Image (cartoon, grey):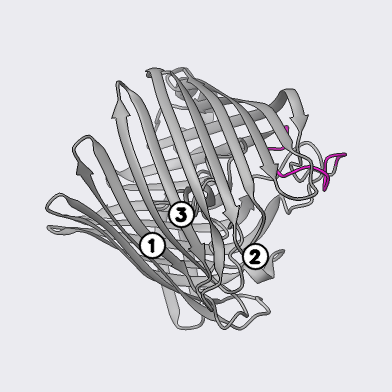
Amino acid sequence: MNLHCICIPLSIKRTFLIASCIPFFTLSASLRAEGLGDNIATMVSEGSAHIALRYRMEEVQQDNLLQDATASTLRARLSLHSATLNRFSLSLEADSIMTIGADDYDSFALDRYRGTHSVIADPVGSEINIASIAYKASENSTATFGRQRLNHDQQRFLGSVGWRQNEQTMDAFSLQQTLGDVALDYSYIWNVNRVFAGSKESAQASDLDSRSHALLLTKSLDWGSLSGFVYALDFDNANAASSLSYGLTYTGNISALKLYASYARQSDYGDNPIDYSSDYYIVEGSSAIGAIKVLLGVESLGSDNGRAAFTTPLATLHRYQGFADIFLNTPSDGLEDRYITFSSTINQLGVSASFHEFEAERGGLNYGSEWNVQLNYPFNPHINVQAKYASYQRDQLAVDTDKLWLSLNMAF
């Protein structure tokens, strides 16, 4: 069995250089040519298979000239995970998204609905969602190569956008390693498979040609956990989205109060034509009052004098700044979001309600406000239903927008 060494130089603005040598055993040598067929058959037969179905009815109404949108879509997902053999394992996942009945919506696909209806970013089509090989060097170290799902922390900088029917996955090399009370999660990403890919050509880029690095270091402490992160995003076909972000995140408890806080600094990177720098912070505190959990938070994405604002193009953006997705692109004057959420569980029914107040980080322009309501009910571990509603009221940005979702999820 041959031992190979892959050396990955990371260069960030000429001031950050990391060189790491990662031992990696080739799968073909590990399985040995004479027993390759039998070994692969064993990995498959002793592995696992899962089927997941997600049906969703989504409706969008906006106070503009676009026609109301309705999308009735079904996502069928088949996931295959092999058994581990000689520390190697394989993962394969395929998705197929189709409409059932109503399909009057703009998915960014270049069809008759493009530009005439409100947007619901769920194009129909089929694709390989995951195709990767993992090598578990030890109980504390795993390297993965290929198409994979990457989620860092609360997905504010790197996430799979699991809310959309077509997830965002990465063609990447990733390494997860634990050293005592420190966890390392590093990825080199050479392609981003975005949510807009479908059977038809899209008005949005379906892929981002990338030379990006994502590094997350988390240390467990007696008083919580502290994470440091660096995201050096360089996109050949989206230069304006290229950026360098670095910062710290704290998660912990003070008595019954749970705290989450993060700060980051961002500047242009790669071939971004705009010279800028901006700041980001989020502070959340939550606690239970009887059976009700109350969360208060403020999130700020800064602006560099209106030239450019803090952005997170690889984030799971639906988790932030309201369900209506008004702020998927940060306004040039930045954004401050002050919000409160009440949540509880009543006889297995999960209920939550949130209110957001949005304004510009620079200049204090009042953008608008939004209400969100969400209900979740699990019938059993395999089947659950969900209902969500979002209502954005415009003040000085965008248009009044109402969205409704009804979902049925089944996983076996």
Residue 134 picture location, percent across and down: 45, 41
Q: Which residue is mark 3?
A: 356
- The amino acid marked with disc number 2 is Phe
Mark 1 Cα-neighbour bin, 10 Å: few <14, some 14–19, many ≥20: some
Q: Earlier in the sequence, mark 2 or mark 1?
A: 2
- Report the side of 286 relative to 322 (left or right): left
Residue 35 visible in image: no
Range drawn in magenta: 111-125
User: The disc labelled 1 sits on which kind of residue?
Assistant: Val
Q: Nearer the viewer, mark 2 or mark 1?
A: 1
Q: Looking at the image, is 55 positioned above or below residue 365?
A: above
Residue 218 percent coordinates (x, y): 29, 59
Could you tell me how far apart the alpha carbons at marks 2 and 1 are, in whole angstroms? Answer: 30 Å
Question: Looking at this rendering, what residue extends furthest in the right direction?
Answer: 112
Which residue lies under the disc numbered 2? 235
Residue 298 bears which disc, if any?
1
Is disc 1 in contact with disc 3, using a CB cutoff of under 8 Å?
A: no
Question: Does residue 402 appear anywhere in the picture?
Answer: yes
* Callout 2 secondary element: loop
Element type at marker 3? strand
Amino acid at the residue labelled 3: His
Q: Position of residue 403 (x, y in %)?
A: 60, 39
**Secondary structure that dominates the magenta span:** loop
Which one is closest to the eye, mark 1 or mark 3? 3
In the rendered image, which quarter is residue 1 located in? top left
